[in-house]
Image (tube, grey):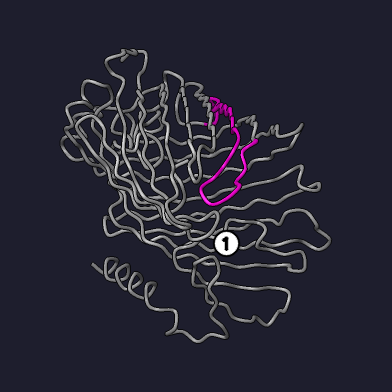
Amino acid sequence: MLRKLIIVATIIIATLPLSAQEYKQIVVDSDTLQYRYTPANPTSRSTVTFGQRLSNSSTLSNNKRVNLAFTVAPGYSANLGWNLVTIGDMLYRTKGQTSSPNLLSLSASASLTGYYSIGLRGTNHLGNYKHSLSYHLGIESTPSTIFGLNYATSALNRQGTYTERLYHGKVAYTSTIANHLLAGAYIDYHYHEAFDFDLVSSTIIGSGTPLFNGAGVGIILGLRTSRATDINLRRGVDITIDALYRPEITTNYNSDIWQISGLFDYYQPLWHGAMMAIDIYGEHHSENTPWMIRAKLGGDCRMRGYYPGQYNGNTLLSAQAELRQRIARPVVLVAWGGAGTAFSKRDPFDISKILPNYGAGIRLYLDSSSVLRFDIGFGRGCRNFILGLNEAF
């Protein structure tokens, strides 16, 4: 009860008018109200923003060493309910650094359903932006729903509930090895625990181990030519291949575990204010992968008509095409359609198991890169409403 009161109070305080605070000046920047004050250090500048995330490195000019920004925004999804997201970003340059600035980001989120997450992310650019070192640490507790471990059981829409807790850490190094071509390697740690099973979820899971603890090493290759030309307008291709290997000695399982994923995103402007965005994604896990970390179909980005993890398997394939049409400078309407499926060796691929996905939404752009997203997606016998920040892809 106390946690609920704290969250409600935080939401109320976060949404109070900015004019109730002391300030030096209030400015309107790209249709977004920002509160600014002059800090003691004249080489830095700080902003507090409601509903906008600082994500454009150009906001740190060459004569600035530090730029701080704080975001407070509501969110909603089927599995989390209504939640509050807070993000603090710091763009900074070290002494003598002239390339793109480094990023340090701290985020926290919580909802009345019991969900909470805390994350720390950072990226440091090295060698005149040709090399970068990034890191991520996160803690998350989520009330989750499971429908089944195969297609037949999941299609019954019989929901079981449980809670999952995740501790995740990752350190990655990437380098530009040719024009638009990136390569890198990373170290990954993953602790995933499931508990508080109800009767339905206990029946679905059976005697499976509800805990995974393991570390691994991975490689990543990417080709990225896409770039933003205007609000909602992008052009180019993003291709990424990611492979992760977890040897037996680093996990609590008696075998090696591995996974590989591939992503293809294509952005093509059409007529005035319109763009077609295409997303093709595949993911494959080794046969002995624990059910908690297998490929999951559904969520806020792909197969948006389905509850996150409503269908799962060792292999996932999905494709979607989205038409985005700007009707006013900050307002964009979208419509999408696609399909996907999840399967495994024991639950093999069948064309009748390919699931449809379609929906529509509206975007409110707060600046050239930050967007408030409203989506409603439909699947086979289900639907999902999403409120969040940033585009689906």
213 drawn magenta: no
- Find residue 258 and report its horizontal and vertical position in percent: 51, 24
- Find residue 22 and report its horizontal and vertical position in percent: 50, 87
Q: Which residue is located at x 65 percent, y 56 percent?
A: 57
Left or right: residue 195 versus residue 136 is left
- Find residue 385 and report its horizontal and vertical position in percent: 28, 47
Q: Which residue is located at x 54 percent, y 50 percent?
A: 137
Q: Is residue 259 above or below residue 3?
A: above
Q: Which residue is located at x 49 percent, y 62 percent?
A: 52
- Find residue 254 and report its horizontal and vertical position in percent: 46, 23
Q: Which residue is located at x 29 percent, y 57 percent?
A: 82
Left or right: residue 89 versus residue 181 is left
Residue type indicated by callout 1: Asp
Reading the image, the residue beneath label 1 is 89
Majority secondary structure of magenta residues: strand
Q: Residue furthest front?
A: 272
Q: Is residue 195 above or below residue 285?
A: below
Q: Residue furthest right?
A: 96
User: What is the magenta range?
Assistant: 225-250
